[in-house]
Amino acid sequence: MFRDELKQPLRKKSLSERLWAKRPSLLIMAYVVTTGGFGGGAFWALKQPLPFAGEPIVTVSIPVAEDVTTASTDAAAAAEPGAEDVAEAPVPDIDSADPAANAPVPEEEAGQQVVRSDDAIIVQPKRSLAPAPIEAVMEVTTWGQLPRIAKSGDKPSKVYARTASLNDIHSDRPKVAILLGGLGLNKKLTQRAMRELPGEITLAFAPYGQDLQEQVNVARAQGHEIFLQMPLEPIGFPASNPGPKTLLGDSSEAENIDAMRWHMSRFAGYAGVVNYMGGRFLSMPKALRPVFSELRARGLLFLEDGSLALSATEQAAKAANLPAKRAKVVIDADPTPQAISNALTMLEEEAKSTGLAVGTGSGLEITIDTLKEWAREANERGIILVPVTASFKGRLG
């Protein structure tokens, strides 16, 4: 500390002494530091993003959602080469010169679908299904790849199905399931159906198209579950002929099983089988029983398309213990817009009366257009669209 200036001789002060004499007071220094701190803090606060400033905020604890893993959402095993293409199989209506026929499905058009629940309207992407075949429910045979029940007991009817949401299952609102057949023959119309129709619409592929496995997997990627159309003997055969290897009522059991396995080997990924024609075959219980036993042993479902006035499907399926169902309406038996709309209205009325109604149709351009518009309007009227597999016993409670 410096000595009292009155007791020291006169002399020139050093620089340090002059600076110390001119030092600011502690009060001023405290003021400057405090003011600087407040100013810097205010500047920092102004630079921070505060989207909820001035709004009340409630913090709640939300448990982490558990992932539900099923075979349809797991990555599929790599596909084995399928059965060889059959040269004699007719492929009608395929325009090979049309570049749109082989164009990939645009992602932006595959985009979103609107789902109306009991509480809200939710816009969500289509829920993709895993590509087929899935190894656990597939076996390689002399016919090619065939469906089978997995060692775990899982069936193709479950593994390849599009599962209905719990909200839809437990809803009291009327439910409609629709299967559209004839897919895989005309690639351009097939792509339109899989791209433009809601994922809840089930698509049935004929066994006579080209690149069937590729088309089926594109359809599954768009959220559609798949059925296989099985050609069965119609009344008036062979003048009315569904195609090669049609199952015939007077053929032996071995011949029909051989033809059936050929059809089943054409592609993988189907949850069930639906008849293609078959007015005579489906009226013959003796011919049906071994076919239905084969379907049951392979873990598949059977849907009768509703085009026949009389059939032995119910009794034969019961004898074989096969899950089978009969559609109520063929929506495009008369392929005109008004007739299709009327048939869909009948389906709605049936669903309101019984809780659920099943209809079938073909992949015609007029059917796709009319069904697309109806699905949008039906959703607004409170109709719930569900996949066909959900209509079988045990899937909707």
Image (cartoon, grey):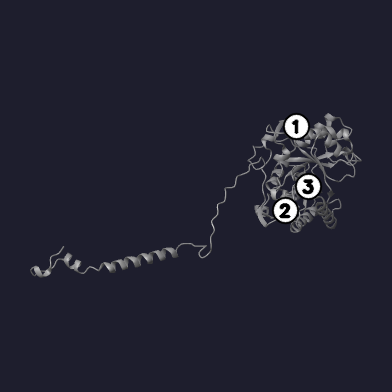
Label whose residue precedes the other's in the sequence (3 or 1): 1
Structural crowding at the residue carrying mark 3, measured as other residues with C-alpha within 10 Å and reported as few (<14), some (14–19) or many (≥20)? many
210 vs 314, left or right, is left
The image position of residue 341, as x and y in percent, is: 82, 56
Front position among marks 3 and 1: 3
Instruction: Name the residue carrying label 2.
Output: 196
Quarter of the image for residue 320 reads top right
Instruction: Name the residue carrying label 1.
Output: 143
The image position of residue 227, as x and y in percent, is: 76, 42
Q: Secondary structure at mark 1?
A: loop
Label 1 is placed on what type of residue? Trp
Kindly identify which numbered label has been placed on residue 179: 3
Label whose residue precedes the other's in the sequence (2 or 1): 1
The correct choice, above or below, for 320 with respect to 220 in the image is above
Quarter of the image for residue 326 reads top right
Of all residues shown, which one is farthest toward the right? 236
Label whose residue precedes the other's in the sequence (3 or 2): 3
Label 3 is placed on what type of residue? Leu
Q: For the point 76% across and 32% down, which residue is it?
A: 297
Does any portion of residue 17 appear in the rendered image? yes
